[in-house]
Amino acid sequence: MARESSARESADLRTVLDALDDADARAIIRALEEPQTASELSERTDIPLSTTYRKLDLLTEAELLEEGTEIRSDGHHTTTYAVAFEEVRIAITESRELDVQIAHVDKGPEERLADIWTAVREET
């Protein structure tokens, strides 16, 4: 199923630029061909797990990654991370200020259901 992208209000410019300027954060983005856990990303990128968690927080805050939940039959669900954008655009506004727009990927029904499950899990 094809997913469409949409541009919407994005994280602030400084947060996005800080995330994109970080070599480890860029390595994580490159490694995310499909949703993965922090442990999987740490192994794949050779970045220490504690650093991986910090970079995942940075990328999530910048709205470049999204968190999901991998539901496991043993009841030990885990958090996964996926790339949440198609492109990042930085432009200069009429008032000569920099502006950032992130073209996010629209979610399919399965992803929306996973988001609902994540919200329920966080509240319980």
Image: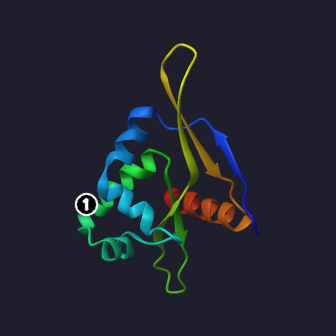
Could you say which is closer to the camera, residue 91 or residue 124? 91
Could you say which is closer to the camera, residue 40 or residue 67? 40
Residue 114 higher or lower than 93, as above or below = below
Around disc 1, counting alpha carbons within 10 Å, would you say few (fewer than 14), some (14 to 19), or many (20 or more)? some
Position of residue 13 measured from the top left corner of the image (x, y, whole percent): 44, 33
Q: What residue is shown with label 1?
A: 51
Position of residue 100 measured from the top left corner of the image (x, y, whole percent): 52, 34
Element class at badge 1: helix
Residue at 49% across, 37% down: 11
Q: Is residue 26 left or right of residue 69?
A: left
Residue at 62% across, 49% down: 104
Could you say which is closer to the camera, residue 109 or residue 86? 86
Residue at 69% across, 46% down: 6
Q: Is residue 67 left or right of residue 114?
A: left
Q: Is residue 118 left or right of residue 32?
A: right
Amino acid under disc 1: Thr
Could you say which is closer to the camera, residue 79 or residue 16? 16
Residue at 50% across, 58% down: 122
Q: How is the image coloured?
A: rainbow
Position of residue 54 measured from the top left corner of the image (x, y, whole percent): 30, 55
Quarter of the picture containing the N terminus is bottom right
Position of residue 91 measured from the top left corner of the image (x, y, whole percent): 54, 30
Residue 51 higher or lower than 6, as above or below = below
Residue 73 position by quadrant: bottom right
- Count of number-bearing discs: 1
Residue 52 position by quadrant: bottom left
Residue furthest right as drawn: 1
Residue 29 higher or lower than 6, as above or below = below
Q: Is residue 109 left or right of residue 57?
A: right
